[in-house]
Amino acid sequence: KNMFIQSNTTWPNDLPYVIYGGLTIDSNATLTIQPGTHIYMHADAPVYIDGSLKVLGDTSESQRVYFTGDRLDQPYATYPGSWPGIYFRSSSRDNVLNFAIFQNGYHSLVAEGPSSDMNPKLSLSQCIINNSLIDGVSGIQSSITAINCLISNCGQNIVISLGGTYQFEYCTVASYSTNLLTHQQPVLTVSNSSSDGTQTSDLNAGFLDCIFWGGESISDEASISMQGNTVFNVLLDHSILKQQNYPANIDSNALWLNTDPKFLATGFPGNTFDFHVEDRKSVV
């Protein structure tokens, strides 16, 4: 049964939450999730945010907030696409996710439509989005800010379409093939057009102090495409990018191409990943 939240609600961390059928937050409601809370989503349980979601995780590992599938037995505990994902729909606003971990989603985080106020529709801080079957973070003519986040081993890590306003700072965006998911698409896909190419919209996207990297046969980890004559500003500033040729349609400042960040572990041995580097941590 779909759970429908119609008034401001707070979830404490005293018990885990298991969601069947889905969860919808009404346009006039805010769901606040306290530090250390664990949420387990069934395979039939998307989360639709028409109002606001506040995730108040904290810095220690025990105080982070976890979203994952409800199958904890192997091998299902690590299957990508185990739950549908979280959808911040057109009326949603002022969503803030701090120190949250999103594992094994289908589309983990999807922001649809522009912000209704001066704040980003979705603000991420110190979050990990990992092992999404399709995409980790998706913005469709929307507004997203992400600071010091790790987006790793997804079908597509970041997908921006139909323009919008985006700012990613101190983020590591990386994918390698695992025993369950093959790295076949660039980790960063940015477009000012709709998926069918029939619409375009203004795009402003900045990436500061970010790493865009992946393994195997993908030579260009950024796909930046522009159509029509709308505003199109994409800046990569002081960032590392695995890219055979300098990408079209961007501006850059101190962009290092093909400078291996030397992650501590990229799948070997034992399908182990650690996206820390010697002089910097992906997530503090």
Image (spheres, rainbow, N blue to C red):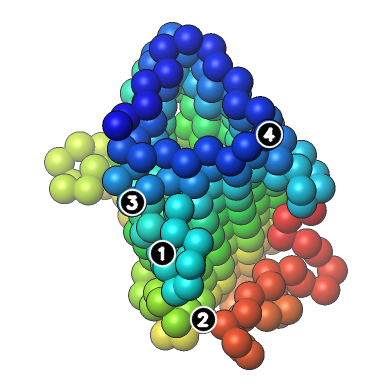
Which residue does the numbered mark 3 point to in the structure image? 43
Q: CA distance from mark 4 to mark 2?
A: 40 Å
Question: On the image, which quarter does residue 76 sit in?
Answer: bottom left
Q: CA distance from mark 3 to mark 1?
A: 11 Å
Q: CA distance from mark 1 to mark 4?
A: 27 Å
The residue closer to the viewer here, 249 or 78, is: 78
- Mark 4 vs mark 2, foreground winner is 4
Callout 4: 10 Å neighbours few (<14), some, many (20+)? few
Q: Which residue is drawn at the image coordinates 66% and 28% (left, top)? A: 12
Going by the numbered disc 2, the residue's amino acid type is Gly
Going by the numbered disc 3, the residue's amino acid type is Ala
Mark 3 or mark 4: whose residue is earlier in sequence: 4
Q: Which residue is drawn at the image coordinates 44% and 59% (left, top)? A: 71
Q: CA distance from mark 3 to mark 4?
A: 24 Å
Disc ID at residue 80: 1
Q: Percent x, y for residue 28? A: 43, 9
Which residue does the numbered mark 2 point to in the structure image? 215
The residue closer to the viewer here, 136 or 191, is: 136
Q: Report if residue 280 is visible in the image.
A: yes
